[in-house]
Every structure is written in structure tokens, then in C-alpha cells.
Amino acid sequence: MADKINVKLVLELRQANMSQRAIAASRHAALVNVYYEKRGLDRDMILTLGNCGFIEKNQPVVFNGFTGSGKSYLACAIGRQACMQGFRTRYIRVPDLMQLLSEASLDVHGRAKLLKKFSGYRLLILDEWLLNDMTESEQHFIFELIERRYDCTSTIFCTQYKREDWHSRLGGGIHADAIMDRIVHTAAWVYSGDINMRELQAKGAES
């Protein structure tokens, strides 16, 4: 029975378009087993998010922390929980989303179709949020996407950047103001901890 559930979950995760790395992580991720020792990670917050009540409340979530601190793993583990609870979920790296936008722009209706597609997911996980500078076209697309999702769906953002850096990373101006206004005031903010989890796992594999 456990194997059947696991196979079903992998199919759901693939439908959520999680990367193979994310699928592998999510298959074995159990929020109750997340490493907390000396990490500075809020256990109660993580377990609460794992119940997916934030999705019911259409609340955004921000995982903030430096490279290797486990933001993607935590987001995908919660995405796994969302799939298990029947929420239509999609994972994507923002650079990959911008590539889809570039390709969609070649078609007269491509941009509108892309917006409709990504607006419809009950939970959208945007990994590597604000990693690259945005063009004006990308900024406008992100604004439209966030606007359509606002107050009717949930989005998880994984980013290295603190809240005070967001405005400049979003390109500044009124669109940056509008994007932030729809995220930062209602989001659950989670610091992913003080430990480089990749380094810790590598040391564990070597020992």
C-alpha cells in the first residue's frame, strides 16, 4: 500500500512540474523529520505550513535564506503535502518561467495563455525568486500574474533576498510597489536557517 501511495505521489509531483531533483527531495521529505538542530528554523511554523491551512486562506509564503539553506527543499516538501491533500500545485524556477514568457511572446496569444495557465494553480511555488534582474516586460508579466492570483490562490516564494531588497530587485517604480503590496503584508515569512544544508549533507555522505 505504501508503495502504491508513493507511486501516485510521484505522478502528482511530476504533474506539478517539479524538477527531478525536487521530486527526489519531496519523495523522501517528511516535515516532521526536517533538520532543526542549531539551524534557527521555526519548527512550529513549518509544521503549521505543512497542514496547508495557508492555502485555504489564500496566503502567500516567503522562504528567505542564503544559498544552500534548504529553501527549495522546504517549499517542495510543502508542495508534496499540498499534492497529498489534493491541491493543484505547480513548481517552477523563475528563470524558467521567464524563458517560457520569452517563448510565449512569439505568439500573439502566447502571453495571455501563459498568464491563464499559471494563474490557475491553487499553489504555485516560485523558486529562485528575484535571482535575476527583470526587464520591463518581465516585471509587467509578474505584476499581472501576482494580481490574478492575489486573494484567491497561494504562492510560495523562495529567495535569497530580504524584504528591504525586493523593490530594487523588482526593477523599482509603481509595478514593483504593486507587486510587493500584494505579497509582503499578508505573507508568512520563514527564515530557512543558519546552516548550509548542502554542505552538511555532503559531510554526512563522506563520513
Image (tube, helix red, strand yellow):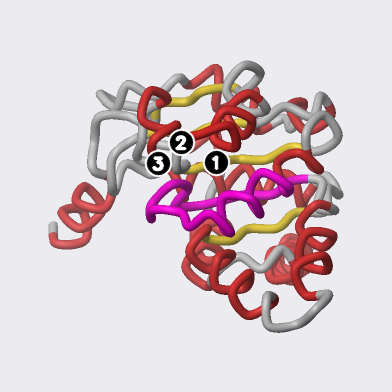
Pointers 2 and 1 in contact (C-beta within 8 Å): no
In the picture provided, is 206 more to the left or to the right than 184?
Answer: left
Judging by the rendered image, the residue that carries numbered circle 3 is 169
Q: Left or right? Give the position of 115 relative to 80.
A: right
Q: Which residue is mark 2?
A: 172
Question: In the drawing, does residue 37 fall left or right of residue 176?
Answer: left
* Span colored in magenta: 123-145
Callout 2: 10 Å neighbours few (<14), some, many (20+)? few
Front residue of 159/203: it is: 159
Which residue is labeled 1 in the image?
A: 157
Q: Position of residue 151 (x, y in %)?
A: 82, 29
| Residue for point 75% across, 54% down | 89
Q: Nearer the viewer, mark 2 or mark 1?
A: 2
Tag of residue 6: none
Where on the picture, by quarter, is residue 11? bottom right
Label 3: which secondary element: helix
Write the residue at 36% across / 36% down.
Answer: 161
Could you tell me the amino acid type at mark 3?
Arg
- CB contact under 8 Å: marks 3 and 1: no
Tell me the CA gap for discs 3 and 1: 14 Å
Local packing at callout 3 (Cα closer than 10 Å; few below 14, some 14-19, many 20+) is some
Marks 2 and 1, how far apart in space? Answer: 19 Å
> Callout 2, which amino acid?
Gly
Which sits earlier in the primary sequence, circle 2 or circle 1? 1
Q: Is residue 126 magenta?
A: yes
- The amino acid type found where label 1 is placed reads Phe
| Sooner in the amino-acid sequence: mark 3 or mark 1 | 1
